[in-house]
Image (cartoon, rainbow, N blue to C red):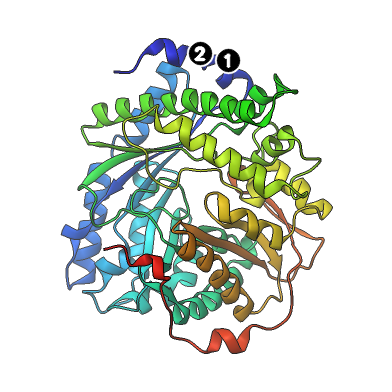
Amino acid sequence: MINLSDILETIRMIQDECLDIRTITMGISLLDCIDSDIDKACAKVYDKITRCAKDLVRVGNEIEKEYGIPIINKRISVTPIAMVSAACKESPVKFALTMDKAAAAVGVDLIGGYSALVHKGFSSGDMELINSIPEALKLTGKVCSSVNIGSTKSGINLDACKLMGRIVRETAEATVDSACFGAAKLVVFCNSVDDNPFMAGAYHGVGEPDCIINVGVSGPGVVRSALAKHPDADINEVSNIIKTTAYKITRVGQLVGVTASQRLGVPFGIVDLSLAPTPKVGDSVAHILEEIGLEQCGAPGTTAALALLNDAVKKGGVMACSSVGGLSGAFIPVSEDAGMIDAARSGSLTIEKLEAMTAVCSVGLDMIVVPGDTTADTISAIIADEAAIGMVNSKTTAVRIIPAIGKNVGEELDWGGLFGCGPVMRLNTKSPSKFISRGGQIPAPLHSLKN
């Protein structure tokens, strides 16, 4: 039972400290849409998405107005399309166009699931879908794509790493007229999860119900404001303040999720506890780390402070809702966080430091802009590095990297809105090509043998 007095406490947070529900995401299974005739399959996909999600935006808007809680995005995730398209012989781009059309028809902001799971190898349809990603993301506005190339149980598919380096670069080149935006809608995962409500990596896992509602909360500004009231607190008190604040934030997510579930007549899934920043001033994870005591994000101590933050958010949030899932942690997307943007511009925050930070938070090297001449093999090796962190630490890691075609270090890409703007960050230019070209499967770590 939700105690509304707990929720009323958060009104000030909403008004003054940038608290919001980042997304309510409806997951929809498309397994019953599979057909060897691609036109029939696409018709089934369109009909099911529009039928299941026809009231999603309306209900989201009603809840937002009724409770005064901003719900920034309404989104849809679907079964990885590689599973649906495998029965067809034509290009899976038709499915992307269908997803885009259905998303526009129901009025959602984004739709995820143009995805493939290849952590142990390529099955029927996977290769065709992956090779179609640049075209699919060029031709659509709302479709997001993801590929899982590794897991703790199976190891890392190095052939998939190599392939995705090329695909990321080709996607940036295909969308150069829109500031390489296609690459901002493409995520490469290790240990991807079935119930992630956040884009661009959301898809609806095969073990999920036919239709479900998942919620992603936000609130970095609330956490920073709470810490600012206790400038002399010791580190144990800092942790407790974050836990208490995360509890209150998560209760809002629980309220929205349960209410949306009841009104839409579909099961409520999970609340993702992640602190999701925006470029808006006062809504930055980097600024929380600075409130803890760093001169600027990226300084020595950043990884330790982030580990503390991530742990405290989970401990506080898990007590506040019926089911926690998704990614659940602190996001550090460079272009989407005002403090991260400033730290990257000043040189305080580097790729190497970001890689270290991803070992203790959600999710990985996220929304990072790199020089336009970065090679596909270099991107592949960055993907492999992040996947290794996820594989060895049994956590989800990801890479969302944007080669800024025609731009160099010191220049920027600007997309506006939640995607923000990204300074081009310097990379180590030594070649990893021989390593990446070896191919094969990096073996799973010994601790994967848990049976």
Rendered position, 108 above or below 380: above
Q: Nearer the viewer, mark 2 or mark 1?
A: 2
Which residue type carries mark 1?
Arg
Q: Which residue is mark 2?
A: 9
Q: Residue at x 55, y 62 (%)?
A: 399
Nearest the viewer among 63 and 47 is 63
Q: In which quadrant of the rendered view does residue 412 lie? A: bottom right
Residue 331 disc label? none
- Callouts 2 and 1 close, C-beta under 8 Å: yes
Q: Residue at x 37, y 43 (%)?
A: 325
Q: Which residue is mark 1?
A: 12
Nearest the viewer among 185 and 290 is 290
Instruction: Look at the image and tell me whether residue 18 can be seen.
Output: no
- The N terminus: image quadrant: top left
Q: Residue at x 36, y 68 (%)?
A: 116
* Distance between the alpha carbons at the discs numbered 2 and 1: 7 Å
Q: In which quadrant of the rendered view does residue 259 lie? A: top left
Label 2 neighbour load within 10 Å: few <14, some 14-19, many 20+: few
Which residue type carries mark 2?
Glu
